[in-house]
Image: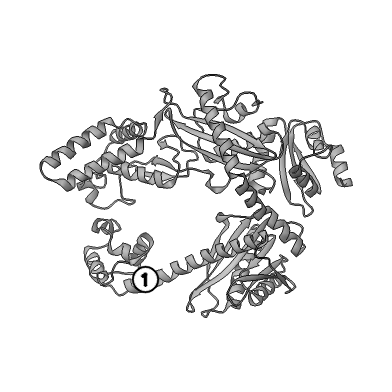
C-alpha cells in the first residue's frame, strides 16, 4: 500500500458514501458504496483476500470518495458512476439485458408493435418475451386478429388491409377512442390466455368455408387457430391473482455468481433468464446492483420474490414495497426452481465464462504489457472498404473492456479522394474522428488499432501529430495468405502474435467485427447507388420518389414486390407506380 492510499484511508469518515478505486492512469476501475466509508474501504487493505479481490487491490493506485446523507443516496450515486465510467471490476449488464415487449402505441390511432424501449411507458405494454422472434410472431398474429392501423403514414383512401377487415380505415372513416379502448382490452385478455372465444369463432368459420369447398380460406383459419394455440400453450397458470412477478435466486462459487430470474406475467410462468458475473463485496449489495441495473431497462413487476435469510434492508427504498421473502407455499417452490436454474447455469457455463474473461480482461492485460500502456479500457478500431475502387467508405468499431460497444460504432463516406488510396482514406477518417473528439469533447480511446500495415499506421500517426493528440496507435500486419501475424507498434517495430493466445483471439475478433461493419456499410452504399441509377431511368420517378423507395424498401426486389396500396401510401402517383412495375419486371427475383 503506497503512502497516498495510507493518507486517504486516514481521512475517510465514518459516514455513508461512494468510493472510487483508481489505477495508475487515474481511471476508475471499481466503484462501491458503503454505510460506513472508513470501515468498508479500509477492509480492502487488511487481511487476506481471495485471488480476484487481491488482483483488484493490486491494481489500485489511488482512491477518492464522496460523502452522502444516507445509504440510499450513496447507492443511487454508485449506479450513476458505474454507468458513466464502466469500471472493469464492476458488474455491468450487457446490451442484451433488455427484452422485447409488445406495445399498443399511445396515439389517437394506435398501432401494435414490438419494442425494447419501455422507459416511462406503463400502460399497454405486454411482456417480456424470451426473444424478438417470438415477440414478432405474436405481433403478426395480433395484427391479423385485431384491426389496428397498419400504415406508418395515413394514405388518402383505405387500403387492402381495410378490405381484408384487418384495419378500421381511420384514414377515411371516423374511429372513436372507445373503439380502440375496447380493442386494447381484448388484446390484454388475449395475451392473458383468454383465447377460447377466438378459437371457437375461427373454428366455426373454418368449418363453414370447408363445407363450401373453399379449402384455401378454411386453411387460413386453421393456421390462425394453430398460431393461437402455439402462442398460449406453454403458459401454465400458477396463481389466479393475475399478478406480474419476478422470482429471483442465485448461487455463488468462489467470486462468481449466477443469478436466475423467472418471469411470471398475469399469474403465468413465461420463461427464465440466467447470467454469470465475477463479483467483489457483499452478496446482497451485488444482487441489489444487478437488479437496479436490470430494472432501469425493464419495468418493475407487482412483486419481486427473493430467497429468505438475507439482509434486504435497502431493497424497499430502491424498488418500493414489492419485495417478498416467502418462507412457505408455492412461492418458495418457485424460488427453489430459480435456485436450481441458477445452479445449473453456473455448472454448465462457468468454464465458458472463465474462458471469455481470459479472452477479454486477460488479453487486454497482455496487450498492456506488450505495448507498455498502463491501462487499456477503450479501443477504437478502423478499417477501409471499397468495391473495385468505387463507393469508398471507412468504419470505426469500439471495444470497451474487451467487449463490443455498438452504440459507439461510426460509419464514414470518404470525401477527399475518389480513388482507393488506403493512405488518404485512413488519414481522412482519423482526422474526422479525432478532430470531432477535440471539438465535441468525445471520449478519448486508450488505443487506436488500424486494420492494415505500415501505410495505414503512418497515415494515422501523421494525422494525430497534426492534431497534437497523443494516443497510442498500432497496425495489424497480415501475411501473404491475408492472415494477421503481427502487431506493428507506434515505433513501427513488429511484434509477432501467437495464434493460440488470448491476445490473438481478441485482436482477430476486433478485426472481423470492423471488417464486417465496413463491408456491410460499403454494400449498402453500393446497392443504393446501383438501385438509384436504375430508378433514375424510370419516367415519372423523380428524386423525392426515388429516395422514398430506397429508404423504405432498400432493394429492387422489395420495391418490385411491394403492394400497390403501400406505394400509394407513400404518395406516389398511379402513373409512376405503373412505370415502376413495368420497368422492374425485367429484373428476376434473387
Image quadrant for the N terminus?
A: top right
Residue at x 79% of width, y 53% of height:
24
Residue 314 x, y percent position in the rendering = 65, 28
Image quadrant for the C terminus?
A: bottom left
Total number of numbered labels?
1
The answer to which quarter of the image holds residue 45 is top right
The answer to which quarter of the image holds residue 69 is top right
The answer to which quarter of the image holds residue 211 is top left
Q: Is residue 93 left or right of residue 25?
A: left
Report which residue position mark 1 lands on. 532
Q: Is residue 189 above or below residue 79?
A: above
Residue 37 x, y percent position in the rendering = 78, 34
Tell which of 23 and 547 is nearer to you. Answer: 23
**Residue furthest top in the image:** 328
For the question of whether residue 436 can be seen, the reply is no
Q: Secondary structure at mark 1?
A: helix
Q: Is residue 519 left or right of residue 103?
A: right
Tell which of 136 and 62 is nearer to you. Answer: 136
Tell which of 91 and 319 is nearer to you. Answer: 91
Residue 421 x, y percent position in the rendering = 56, 79
Amino acid at each position: 500500500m503506497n503512502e497516498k492510499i495510507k493518507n486517504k484511508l486516514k481521512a475517510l469518515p465514518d459516514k455513508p458514501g461512494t468510493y472510487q478505486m483508481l489505477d495508475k492512469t487515474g481511471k476508475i476501475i471499481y466503484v462501491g458504496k458503503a454505510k460506513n466509508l472508513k470501515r468498508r474501504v479500509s477492509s480492502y487493505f487488511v487481511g487476506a483476500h481471495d485471488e480476484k479481490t487481491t488482483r483488484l487491490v493490486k491494481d489500485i493506485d489511488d482512491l477518492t470518495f464522496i460523502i452522502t446523507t444516507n445509504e440510499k443516496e450513496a447507492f443511487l450515486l454508485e449506479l450513476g458512476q458505474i454507468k458513466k465510467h464502466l469500471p472493469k471490476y464492476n458488474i455491468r449488464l450487457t446490451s442484451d439485458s433488455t427484452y422485447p415487449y409488445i406495445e399498443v402505441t399511445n396515439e389517437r390511432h394506435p398501432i401494435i408493435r414490438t419494442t425494447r424501449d419501455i422507459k416511462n411507458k406503463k400502460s399497454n405494454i405486454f411482456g417480456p418475451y424470451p426473444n424478438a422472434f417470438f415477440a414478432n410472431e405474436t405481433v403478426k398474429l395480433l395484427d391479423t386478429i385485431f384491426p389496428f392501423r397498419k400504415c406508418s403514414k395515413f394514405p388518402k383512401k383505405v387500403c387492402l388491409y381495410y378490405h381484408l377487415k384487418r384495419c378500421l380505415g381511420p384514414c377515411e372513416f371516423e374511429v372513436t377512442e372507445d373503439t380502440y379502448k375496447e380493442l386494447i382490452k381484448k388484446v390484454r385478455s388475449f395475451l392473458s390466455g383468454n383465447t377460447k372465444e377466438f378459437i371457437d369463432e375461427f373454428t366455426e368459420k373454418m368449418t363453414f368455408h370447408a363445407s363450401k369447398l373453399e379449402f384455401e380460406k378454411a386453411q387460413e383459419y386453421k393456421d390462425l387457430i394453430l398460431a393461437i394455440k402455439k402462442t398460449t400453450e406453454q403458459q401454465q397458470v400458477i396463481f389466479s391473482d393475475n399478478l406480474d412477478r419476478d422470482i429471483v435466486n442465485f448461487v455463488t462459487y468462489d467470486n462468481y455468481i449466477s443469478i436466475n430470474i423467472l418471469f411470471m406475467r398475469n399469474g403465468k410462468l413465461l420463461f427464465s433468464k440466467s447470467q454469470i458475473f465475477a463479483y467483489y463485496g457483499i452478496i446482497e449489495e451485488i444482487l441489489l446492483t444487478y437488479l437496479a441495473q436490470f430494472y432501469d431497462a425493464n419495468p418493475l413487476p407487482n412483486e419481486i420474490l427473493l430467497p429468505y435469510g438475507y439482509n434486504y434492508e435497502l431493497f424497499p427504498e430502491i424498488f418500493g414495497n414489492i419485495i417478498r421473502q416467502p418462507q412457505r407455499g408455492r412461492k418458495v417452490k418457485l424460488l427453489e426452481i430459480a435456485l436450481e436454474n441458477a445452479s445449473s447455469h453456473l455448472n454448465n457455463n462457468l468454464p465458458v465464462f472463465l474462458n471469455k474473461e481470459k479472452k477479454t480482461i486477460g488479453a487486454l492485460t497482455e496487450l498492456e504489457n506488450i505495448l507498455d500502456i498502463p491501462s487499456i479500457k477503450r479501443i477504437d478500431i478502423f478499417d477501409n472498404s471499397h468495391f473495385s475502387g468505387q463507393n469508398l467508405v471507412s468504419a470505426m468499431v469500439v471495444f470497451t473492456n474487451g467487449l463490443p460497444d455498438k452504440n459507439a460504432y461510426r460509419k464514414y463516406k470518404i470525401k477527399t479522394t475518389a480513388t482507393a488510396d488506403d493512405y488518404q482514406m485512413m488519414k481522412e477518417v482519423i482526422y474526422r474522428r479525432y478532430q470531432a473528439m477535440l471539438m465535441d469533447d468525445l471520449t478519448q480511446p486508450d488505443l487506436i488499432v488500424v486494420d492494415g500495415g505500415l501505410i495505414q499506421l503512418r497515415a494515422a500517426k501523421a494525422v494525430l501529430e497534426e492534431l497534437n493528440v497523443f494516443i497510442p496507435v498500432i497496425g495489424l500486419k497480415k501475411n501473404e495468405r491475408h492472415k494477421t501475424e503481427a502487431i506493428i507498434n507506434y515505433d513501427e517495430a513488429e511484434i509477432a502474435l501467437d495464434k493460440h493466445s488470448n491476445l490473438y483471439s481478441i485482436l482477430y475478433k476486433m478485426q472481423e467485427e470492423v471488417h464486417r461493419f465496413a463491408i456491410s456499410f460499403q454494400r449498402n452504399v453500393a446497392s443504393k447507388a446501383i438501385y438509384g441509377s436504375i430508378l433514375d431511368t424510370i419516367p415519372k420517378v423523380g428524386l423525392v420518389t426515388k429516395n422514398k423507395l430506397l429508404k423504405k424498401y432498400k432493394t429492387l426486389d422489395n420495391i418490385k414486390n411491394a403492394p400497390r396500396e403501400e406505394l400509394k401510401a407513400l404518395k406516389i402517383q398511379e402513373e409512376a407506380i405503373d412505370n415502376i412495375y413495368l420497368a422492374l419486371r425485367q429484373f428476376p427475383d434473387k
